[in-house]
Image (cartoon, rainbow, N blue to C red):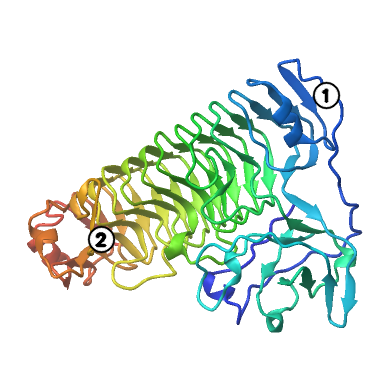
Amino acid sequence: MAFVAVCVGLAACSAAVGPRVELPAPTVPSDTTTTFPIDVDLSEPVVRLTPGVDLSGIVEAAHEGTTFILGPGLYRTDTIVPKAGMTFSGAPDTVISGAFVLDGWRSEGDRWRLDGIAASVRDHGRCIADYEGCSLSQDLFMDDVMLWQVTDEADLRSGTWMWDGDSVLVADDPTVRRVELSVVDYAFVGSADDVTLESIVVEKFATPAQEGAVQAQEPGEGDRGRRWTLRGVEVRFVHGAGVRAGDDTVIDRSYIHHNGQLGITGAGGTGLVITESEIAENNVAGFSWEWEAGGVKITNSTDVTLSGNHVHHNRGPGLWGDLDNVGMVYVDNISTDNTGPGIFHEISGAAVIDGNTVERNGSDKTGWLWGAGILIAGSWDVEVSNNIVRDNANAITGVQQDRGEGPHGERLLRNLFVHHNTIDVGHGHVGIAEDVGDDAVFTERHNRFETNTYVGGTGRSFAWLDHWLDRTGWQYVGQDVDGVWVGR
């Protein structure tokens, strides 16, 4: 199956300009798939299922600890609420979908209408400039391509769709394509412990922003489940986040991509591990990343490990720890081509950022010291070491603004230790800046750069004490006095 990005660059996603959505050649539309119950023996610890079953109903009737072996094929399902110890194991091409096929279209000149569709839309989130459709949680697909949702009929054209009361309008001929509407909020959700998903594709759920199609937590800010494991799971085409973590969630060797707002999110939990996974092309629904969008965003959490992941082409930050996180480890990741910072540690506590390769990030916001490959904002006790940083809008930067106080005290940039990195400063800047009129971030808070290797950087590439400095000035203020500069 080919996956087509809904837009290339956030600037292309406004209602006035719109994304370029390329539909494949028309196909004969498939019949609507209907789920229906069948007799299943639930007395055994292992239950084998095939498409066409009432999957959510079977899970509801099963015992704790049941293992479900899901044969290949498409399962259109209502929300599944696992019980403690349940395992869901798929096969090649096992797909769980929250969308249903639409048919019965009628032509109206240069557009097509389908009446009698009861919209169940959650309006939540902030979109990019001049656009409102991101906050509406249902999405329309033609032959597995997500269409761009518009809110004004004047913007309706090929590759777009819109609600018109209880009708759906499209510009492309839907009678020669398979047209699906996401209608189910969650694929797997709840606070049960020890749930495992493996070798399953989850797609096309109408999950609201800041929630996950796979969610180890009750909806909203409900109780979290413990020890959920996702192994070899693919999550795609979800309106909100692909996954929302609970406590001690493990996401291993999974592929989280082309989701509307975020790839992975989590709030208030502990012990999250994301390892050896690909997190790519998220925020295809046009959310403002400064509100919340991109690859991975974790808030108010402790002891989080992000290790060995490939995080790329997200519309927003690649890896983002925001708001009073403590004990975050970003290690051995590759973070490239994200429109926000490659790694962004914001108003949070102790963190280690080590051994990452961070390239070509930050194109969406390049002024001041924003758009960095690695950006540390109002955070404390952060060590940044052994990273390769090149071709980003800025390189490794720290910023101090007025961010108030949190549970760990005033949110200050302090004890930032940047050392033994290889930094290409042919693009952007390195250093620290503030906009609160207080030099303490430079003189009293033990922020320092030591033993880094710089490629290029012979100009005024360094920020310190509200000045742009060259190498001589940088070393004069005590930074990288043992640093190494090499040419290209």
The quadrant in which the C terminus is found is bottom left
The front one of 318 and 246 is 246
Judged from the image, the secondary structure of the residue bearing numbered disc 1 is: loop
| Residues at circles 2 and 1 in contact by the CB criterion of under 8 Å | no
Residue 96 percent across, percent down from the top left: 72, 42
Badge 2 density bin: few <14, some 14–19, many ≥20, Cα 10 Å: some
In the visual, does 55 lie left or right of 278? right
Residue situated in front as seen by the camera: 408 or 235: 408
Whether 2 is drawn above or below 44: the answer is below
Q: Position of residue 113 (x, y in %)?
A: 83, 72
Looking at the image, can residue 115 be seen?
yes
Q: Residue at x 45, y 52 (%)?
A: 335
Q: Looking at the rendered structure, which numbered label has been put on residue 40? A: 1
Within 10 Å of the Cα at label 1, are there few (<14), some (14-19), or many (20+) other Cα atoms? few
Disc 2 to disc 1, C-alpha distance: 56 Å
**Left or right position of 156 against 447:** right
> Which residue is pictured at 89% across the width and 53% down the height?
30
Q: Residue 80: where, in percent of width, then height?
A: 67, 37
Q: Residue under circle 2?
A: 403
**Residue at figure coordinates x 47%, y 60% from the top left:** 338
Residue type at mark 1 is Val
Which tag, 2 or 1, sits closer to the chain's start?
A: 1
Camera-side residue of 451 and 336:
336
- Please identify the quarter of the rendering in which residue 370 is found: bottom left
Q: Which element type, helix, strand or loop, lies under badge 2? A: loop
Residue 231, image quadrant? top right
Kind of residue indicated by mark 2: Arg
Number of labelled discs?
A: 2
The residue depicted at 52 percent of the width and 39 percent of the height is: 217
